[in-house]
Amino acid sequence: DPSRSALSTIPQRFGVMVGGLTTGRILIAQAAVDASKLALTIAFKYSTKRRQFGEKLIIDYLSHQRRLVPSLAETFAYHFAMMDLMRLVQSKSSPKQEHTLSSGLKAAATWTKTEILQRCRECCGGMGFLAVNQIGPMICDMNVDVTFEGDNSVLMQQVVKGMLKEGLSNVGIKKPSLDDQSVIDEVAIQELLITRQRVLTAKLGRKIQAATCQGISAEQAFDDNLDLVLSLGWAFVEAHVMKIFHERVSSAGEGFRRPLGLLCHLYGLSRIENDAAFFLTHGLLPPSSTEVVHAQSNDLCRRLSHNAGKTLLSLCEGFAIPSYFITAPIATDAEHFPSTATINLAKL
């Protein structure tokens, strides 16, 4: 009986009901971001010292940069998104928004972490597989996160259900205008990501409406389009994360704005590149733009990796990971790295 409850409004009761789940998902998402930070720190420390084929550092190879630097951009993006979510939770202003964002960010952050840890492992070669170098055990221990406190695919469905309940399927669609297609900046990327979200939302709304007109329940119509639902969940999360990242760059101090701006730009480009088929098939980008996006991404990776990766190391230092958490021998300042022969396997 609502009249006998100490929680007088529906939003208050909803907030209490999902509060426990929200807290768990926030903790898991934050742990995923922190694991990505540690793995990237180890991988960058190794790649800025490890030489191959003469005197060339492995961080100087573009193929190495393209695996690690966009991962660093993603990690910073989710770091800022999680900070924003925690401020929202502390304000207690919107339990439903907390539930939607915690579900989406938990799914996106843990899926992304799984990919980042694997890239870091590979970028450290056989050394990355050794338990003593930390990345391998994190892969094993944290893989469960993608289904812990909710299967990620189901959490993305909750994100979309929350969007539909808020009436976002009626949001108008405006095709972004790109004045100079030789350069796609952060503002244009934000417009593209928001437009993708709106196009997918409207598409799902039309499919559900058409199905209900044929006597099919809205719930069944939703289930019949789960592939579209998952794409929409990702679109919502990535548009939100890009927005938060860009805001944090704009408010950053002068000394931090440039490197963070490069990372923000790279994060956005990586999202466009990752779903290029959508933007091309829906006429949001011309075919020639895929080469532009790829070339810009390469350029940003090179710029951030210049000077033997010192900028990348400085960015990793910004994570403020205590030194006693970084125990991997390949992340130390030693000139030589231990081989398997120096490790007592019986004690592992």
Image (cartoon, helix red, strand yellow):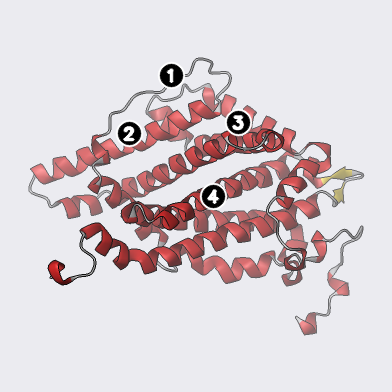
**Residue carrying label 3:** 294
Q: CA distance from mark 4 to mark 1?
A: 27 Å
The x, y position of residue 281, in whole percent, is 39, 29
Above or below for 42 versus 141 = above
Q: Which residue is drawn at the image coordinates 51% and 58% (left, top)?
A: 110
Tell me which corner region of the image, top left, top right, bottom left or bottom right, holds residue 205.
top left
Q: CA distance from mark 2 to mark 3?
A: 24 Å
Q: Which residue is drawn at the image coordinates 38% and 31% (left, top)?
A: 195
Sequence order check, earlier mark of 4 and 3:
4
Q: Which mark is residue 78?
A: 4
Query: Could you tell whether 77 is left or right of 300 in the image?
Result: left
**Residue carrying label 2:** 199
Q: Nearer the viewer, residue 187 or 348?
A: 187
* Disc 3: CA contacts within 10 A as few (<14), some (14-19) or many (>=20): some
Identify the amino acid type marked 1.
Ser
**Residue carrying label 1:** 177
Callout 2 secondary element: helix
Sequence order check, earlier mark of 2 and 3:
2
- Tag nearer the camera, 2 or 3: 2
Q: CA distance from mark 1 to mark 2?
A: 16 Å
Callout 3 secondary element: helix
Tell me which corner region of the image, top left, top right, bottom left or bottom right, holds residue 254.
top right
The x, y position of residue 123, in whole percent, is 72, 53
Q: Which mark is residue 138?
A: none
